[in-house]
Image: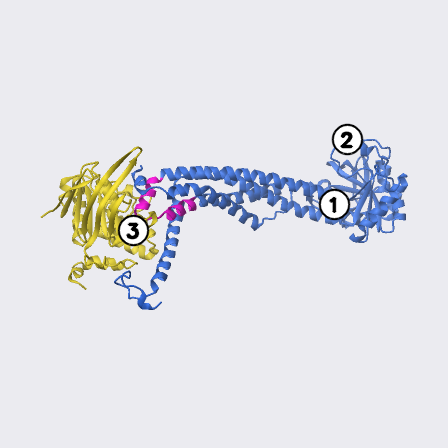
Amino acid sequence: MTEATIERTQASERTQASTLPKPEVSSNGKAQVLIAMKEIWKTYDMGAEKVHALHGVSFEVQRGEYVAIIGPSGSGKSTLMNLIGCLDTPSQGEYWLNGKNVSEMDDDELARIRNQEVGFVFQTFNLLARATALHNVELPLIYGGIPGAKRHEMAMQALSEVDLVERMTHRPNELSGGQRQRVAIARALVNNPSILLADEPTGALDTATSYEIMNLFEKLHEEGNTIILVTHEHDIAARARRVISIRDGLIEKDEQIK
Amino acid sequence: MSPGSLSPTNTSAGLAPGQTVSPLRRLRSFRILRITAIWDAFFVALGSLRQNKLRTALTLIGIIVGVTAVIAVVTIIKGLDQTVAQTFSSQGSTVFTVSKRPQVITSREDFIKFNKRKAVTPDDADAIARLCNACWRTGVAVNSVQPAKRGDQKIEATQVRGMAPNHMFDIDGVAIDTGRVWTESEGAAGADVCVVGSDIVTNLFPGDPADRAVNQDIWVGGHRYLVVGVLQPLGKILGISRDNRVYIPFATYKKRFGIDFSGQAFSPSGVLVVFIQTQNAQQLENAEDQVRSIMRNRRGKIFNDDGDDGFALETQDVFLNLYSSATSNIYLVTIGVAAISLVVGGIVVMNIMLVSVTERTKEIGIRKAVGARRKDILTQFLIEAVMVTAIGGAFGVLTGFGTAWLIALAIGFPLLFSIWSAVLGVSVSSIVGVISGLWPAWRAARLDPIEALRAE
């Protein structure tokens, strides 16, 4: 066991809790590379003309990084986020996530990757309105095939991570905005994903609550989670350790902070 | 293949080379996954149906109507089948009749034609009894409808049946409950005696047991008769009581009401029917042939004459054939009604499911984002559609049995609830659910997660 793995004891403990053993990335020695994007193009067919949302984007994200992707609307950052989150596949180029070539996968394989590797946090929370907080958090585990008792246990653990155990029987409309976003974060964490992918997570929240959520991300980062934050707000992006700026479908800047 | 040939490049660090449990473990986890997701889909479907109670109820109506129709009709007809079987077996398959007109006449023209025929007379009955060696017992009977009364108690209409000889009681399949039948000498002398059905006792001797009616006088059709016996109840058929009868000797009937041998179309006093019984069912056909030729001889008809015999020779099959053709028509109509309402119900379910998919696009997007695959979504909506129609089917079974029960109460026949019709009702409507849910569910399953998440 290497020193690096010992440092992330908490993270690896949660990895062991997952049912399927994950391979420790590729065999080429770059064990730390979690996301590898190589010359990614995304082209939309708008009738006669073709619109290029991404013009050959390439970057890598190491395990445990805290990255903000920033850019104005129409810059292609939503497209990039959909690709990173395996909701979509690139028109050209290769995308490797945790040692798997995602760019060639079909719908159901992508669904499995989303289930196992990606935890989504959305601007509008996207919780099931009729389900309790607990059921919302259990949802990825249901599709992951985790049996009932184990599922409950894991969901409770995720809810305690975001400090919402006492609200687990509440439905989203009985929770404040910040609480809803914390339920969404618990849902994103519950499957022990490789990446936590947050799309404007504070966009629907007031300043104080935004601050609270950003502190939660800070804590999760310190616990060893890999976080990718998509935003258009510079002060939110400034909380990350690395900022990738997107403009017109290309990476404009890629800088480490501090 | 040696264990060493399993290349370590594809094997993860956690698994030793050659370890073969992995596929099995994957299979097992896959099966658990299906069950978990299906179980969840059940609760989701239940929740969504509860959420839209009115819509669910309206969706159910088409299915309920279809299944109700089938269950009610099947139950009623099964009850009738039993009643009919019992009724006709009481006269048995050894009895046939000769009369100037058939017992079932379906047109006015036929009725007039048959009534113009020469009457069948007691002499014909005697000839049959004398000449037919395959025949066992013969008798004559004639019916008419008359009012009856005793003191203040009245019956508007009762069936008066004059018959001879006394073994006609056996041929008719009735038996004495209390008292006696009239003696041969009473019968021959045309004595004013009668044997009554249980309804007569109920209506003319209210509150009294049957034996209190014996040796009392009643008035039937303006004449007084002494009740000498009461018959065991026969019950109802198609809501018509078979116990509202007064039996009197044939000679008495002839004296009091007359028997019309004139050949007029409408005779108030009834038409003579000769009853012939054989020892066993095997001899029935032989006896029929003998009786037919005896009757033809008496009418001066030639053998193989294509013309009208001038009399009707019938077994109880006439009724059974009429009954089974009537019920098979009812079955056909019901199947038609049920098919139409199930198709309409299916279209309604499909429509509602399409609305449901559109309304829940966002939910589908969320589910897909967290890892639901196409078949998970497909299963969820299929389960929902099947659940609606299965509930509709179950309701239909209940209301169908209820309807049958009410009708059975009203017209009086045994109720036979059959499990298979309930199972059939629920499973057919579930199949309707699968068929009509398939397209909406497929549309839901194919939704693009990004588009679906963007929906409001």
Q: Which chain is blue?
A: B
Under tag 2, what secondary structure?
Answer: helix
| Three-letter amino acid code at the position of disc 1 | Asp
At x 31%, y 46%, the residue is A132
Under tag 1, what secondary structure?
Answer: helix
Q: Can marks 1 and 2 be said to lie on one chain?
A: yes
Q: Using the image, tell me which numbered label, if any, was put on residue A113.
A: 3
| Three-letter amino acid code at the position of disc 2 | Glu
Coordinates of residue B12 in the picture (x, y in percent): 27, 61
Coordinates of residue B214 in the picture (x, y in percent): 78, 46
Coordinates of residue B315 in the picture (x, y in percent): 77, 45
Report which colour depicts chain A: yellow
At x 89%, y 39%, the residue is B299
The subunit letter for the residue under badge 1 reads B
- Identify the residue under disc 1: B317
At x 13%, y 48%, the residue is A241
Instruction: Describe residue A173's horizontal placement relative to residue B253 as left or right.
Output: left
Q: Report how far apart the C-alphas of labels 1 and 2 lie in the structure.
A: 23 Å
At x 51%, y 39%, the residue is B343
Q: Quadrant of the C terminus of chain B?
A: top left
Name the residue at the left extreme: A258
